[in-house]
Amino acid sequence: MWRGERTALRMLRVNLSTESLKDETIDEETAKKFVGGRGIGVKILYDELKAGIDPLSPENKLIFMTGPATGTVFPASGRFHVITKSPLTGGIGDSNCGGNWGPELRFAGFDGIIVEGKAKDPVYLWIKNGAGELKSAEEYWGLGVWDTEDRIQKELGEKRAKLASIGPAGEKLVLIAGIMNDKHRAAGRAGVGAVMGSKKLKAVVVRGERKPAVFDPDGLSRVVEKAIQKLKENAVTGEGLPKLGTPILINVINESGALPTRNFQTGVFPGADKISGETLQKTILTGTKPCWGCPIACGRVSKVTEPPYQVEGEGPEYETDWSLGAMCGVDDLNAITKAHNICDEMGIDPISLGSTVACAMELYEKGLIPKEKLGGMELKFGNPQAIVELAWRTGIRSGFGDEIAQGSKRLAESYGAPELAMHVKGLELPAYDPRGIKGHGLGYATSNRGGCHLRAYMIAPEILGIPEKLDPLTPNGKAKWVIAFQDIFSMADSLVICKFLTFALTADDLTALSNPVTGWNWSVDDFNKTGERIYNIERMFINREGFSRKDDTLPERLLKEPMPEGPAKGHVVELDQMLDEYYLLRGWEDGRPTAEKIEELGLR
Amino acid sequence: MWRGERTALRMLRVNLSTESLKDETIDEETAKKFVGGRGIGVKILYDELKAGIDPLSPENKLIFMTGPATGTVFPASGRFHVITKSPLTGGIGDSNCGGNWGPELRFAGFDGIIVEGKAKDPVYLWIKNGAGELKSAEEYWGLGVWDTEDRIQKELGEKRAKLASIGPAGEKLVLIAGIMNDKHRAAGRAGVGAVMGSKKLKAVVVRGERKPAVFDPDGLSRVVEKAIQKLKENAVTGEGLPKLGTPILINVINESGALPTRNFQTGVFPGADKISGETLQKTILTGTKPCWGCPIACGRVSKVTEPPYQVEGEGPEYETDWSLGAMCGVDDLNAITKAHNICDEMGIDPISLGSTVACAMELYEKGLIPKEKLGGMELKFGNPQAIVELAWRTGIRSGFGDEIAQGSKRLAESYGAPELAMHVKGLELPAYDPRGIKGHGLGYATSNRGGCHLRAYMIAPEILGIPEKLDPLTPNGKAKWVIAFQDIFSMADSLVICKFLTFALTADDLTALSNPVTGWNWSVDDFNKTGERIYNIERMFINREGFSRKDDTLPERLLKEPMPEGPAKGHVVELDQMLDEYYLLRGWEDGRPTAEKIEELGLR
């Protein structure tokens, strides 16, 4: 999507074992079928990866993708997508990230990068205006993300260069390590940072000056103008998110009785108000920070002035506020903010960190983790020291941090209580208890990458009433909604744009916005069908790795232990019922697309 | 000193570059001249090291030495000495350490180890019952000291094996990194851990079953019995140290107006009682822990139960209690204990860490360190977060920890205020302000390894009245005392025994104890003369590296800024006067032994 080559994608293929760099293009036909971002990424992975390879071996590939919208005037298009085989789940490992890196990669002349093999000694990849080279990262190996950004920018004399890099966590193959950019933005989930670490790739540094071409600039401007108007007028994107950021949800979800508390033991957190977006705004908030070209600017900038958790940085966001807070029973916003920033610096996924710490807390309280392992730290719910110290320790795999580093599934299994890990397919669940939001539970269970709220954000209809209000406590009729969300979100991740747009914009709007970018003149059906294709090829990837209906499930607790209190009191998730309906509507059997479905989607 | 070879020392020479291990002996004549430990170590270094080599290059040598007393019934003989060229000072870098490692090395059949060269990939040295081998330490590289001990013991299936190892600090060439054993015992000073890291030597692991031979076991038993009686009857070794440990000194030294506070800005710390040995005993103390075979057992075992500084470990000892406490204006014993234990785990010298943090605090308060470097941490005196967070950060060289890692001299110079680093010859001063203990100041200035209280412990006569009480505020007549202490302590470090014995035992006693060990039948004069020889060859080593009278000095503050309050109010250190007398008595000129002195000591 540059030099006017409208739909051919320009890729850089980097083999770290042979130190070879090669320009490649992806043809228009493939681009039309998989768009960009997540769609193209999973297509490459499906075609090129042998089933059953070790995700931390040189055979794995790490793909950085932008989409046709990235870095254009399309609103909230400052993102990119990372796709690989996950070392945490063994399935698809992909993660989407904001900031400035994605647009800058396109400005530097590439739509995506395929990283293969493994470097002998640590390297970083430096791409400027269409040309890439590998450079030694020996002197940066071991550094935190923030130091890495500063020092590599200094070495290159390029203050405006953008880095996607790993911290000590990724280097040390922490299975919950992320890839960071702009110091605080994380492609956090599924252990993508560990894959980068296994390849001894410290950073991908990009800088460029060419604007990505779009098919119809004037047409795009016109629809963008309308879209921005809608975003401004919308209560969520125009007021809630800009003002209170994502932590606006702490009180909302807690009042719905679905804020997972103390490792999902309940859905009501007594300390919610102390860690809410409102409290954050009144106490430690110092500013907001948008991703590239975003009119919403949900990112929080904050400063804690009181010891022992002084820090000047960013966050917390809703997910980290919850994972390091309610999930661990911690109501100390300062400690949460400190731990959030340590995760950013060390390159750790704070969702999985908090959830794994919470799992450890429950194991400890149940007497399953011996005291001797903890060096005097009382690993009880509510202990703010635990989240801060274990963030450091996990980053460097020191002491008990080495056990947190493996994620909750392996941790709970190692102590003989696998039911205490709150994960799907090995990926830790995010900040919504599906006993209080049933459709969202179906979304968790059927997410191709595992426990994830960003494959089908059922919070919108079930809690926020967008585009219409559904009863969160019934399983009935949720499957079609989940599927619709999964397909449209597959498109969002492939275009690549921010999903927050969908609070204000419909599939029609997004189709109207993407047509002047691509020139494909799609109907909404084309748009949704393409999303469906992407969701299905992902599913085919994980099927090939051994995933099936048995893995489309939820932690036992959510299926069998009734919610003990609050609006969802007495509820469990009626998963099987929803799942049957879901598979029927998807055209899947036993969690696998049927031959007919595969044929229909052109995925044979 | 085994297999009945009475005075020939059995050494293991390990060249990491060539992976060769060689048994060697040191003949009786050399042993009689330099004894063992520090004496033999500096002799080897003097003979084998070219002047001017880079301490972190393969050309440096790292020597682990026991002495003839080590691991025998000689009381408090559970120690060893590390000798190398210091990367922190550029002079002699040596450090003495307790615990169990020293005796175990002798049990394993060696009196000492000379490590040369540099391993290609991380290794550890495993010595059992007279045989050594190099083993891969790839999987331990990056680990903290505690994990390293546990895991290597597990790999070897040797729970009783003792490790001397480095943490991340040593690996990352932190110039204030130490070598640790028994999890909490540190050969901490002068950056010996960085030398070990530069050689990619993660640990030296020892295990053995042969008791070291002594010349006259029965004779030794008889004098030992008397010595132990004296130790028990002595107020310091029989009661004060066992009961309150070294932190007993916090109140004593503070009441003398010589507890260095806020980077030596004053000698009176208002928070002293909160961090005193008495308070420690009443609050966090859970037990005591002796070094091998020691009747004193000064080591503190402690547990902090309150977040955010929960920890179960050891310490603080007087020096760390002070350096992380009063020196930084911190009166939070929990935070001090936490930081102490992080230093132990990361392998950092807590004296130099605390002093360098204090230096940074003064630089910051004076506006010389920009806020942006600190990520929101207010680096002001009294902030307990600073000592804890900077202990982590220094261990992994992250953020501002990377600047602390270079020690106070380089730090203060880099901010244009070298006068704010409280060091001698580059080594941070310990816990006594010499404006209130003048002779101790001469000891600091003339210490061959730089700022050190363990070359001449003038606190004994000037504060404690051992063996007689001197006026701490006069410089008169101190030189001869300093010399006597330096020589007897050279012997203590060479025998190798604990200096705390000298609270109760005189040079006569020590001579009487050492004769049945060595069979040399020395007079006290022989004993002292040998100490003098060792002190002089050390001096010749540092002279060759460029040190002279100009380096036998103190920080400007101690020479020019009168103590602002307390018993030493108005005092500075009259160093020149003491130094002239000292050189005269030493037979030195311009800080160098004269040709006659060298001849007299047989050091030509």
Image: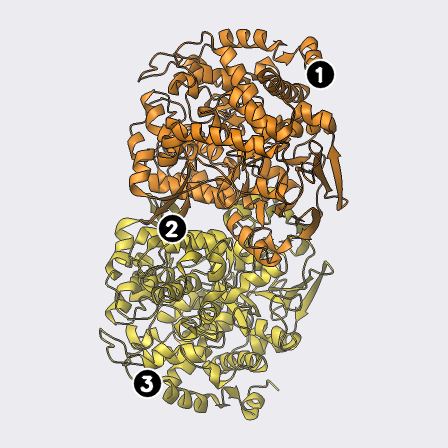
Chain colours: A yellow, B orange
Mark 3 residue element:
loop
Disc 1 designates what residue?
B602
The answer for which chain carries disc 3 is A
In the visual, does A466 lie left or right of B224? left
Mark 1 residue element:
loop
| Quarter occupied by residue B233 | top left
| Dot in front, 1 or 2 | 1
Callout 2 amino acid? Lys
| Dot in front, 3 or 2 | 2
Query: A263 above or below B488?
Result: below
Residue B290 rendering spot, x and y as whole percentages: 46, 40
Q: Nearer the viewer, residue B340 or A338?
A: B340
Residue A502 rendering spot, x and y as whole percentages: 39, 71
Q: Nearer the viewer, residue A335 or B480?
A: B480
Quarter in which the C terminus of chain A is drawn:
bottom right
Disc 3 designates what residue?
A475
Which numbered tag is attached to residue A521?
none
Q: Residue at x 38, y 13 (%)?
A: B562
Whole-number angstrom distance, CA of label 3 to CA of label 2: 38 Å
Residue A30 rendering spot, x and y as whole percentages: 62, 77
At label 1, counting other C-alpha atoms closer than 10 Å, the crowd grade (few under 14, some 14-19, many 20 or more) is few
Callout 3 amino acid? Pro
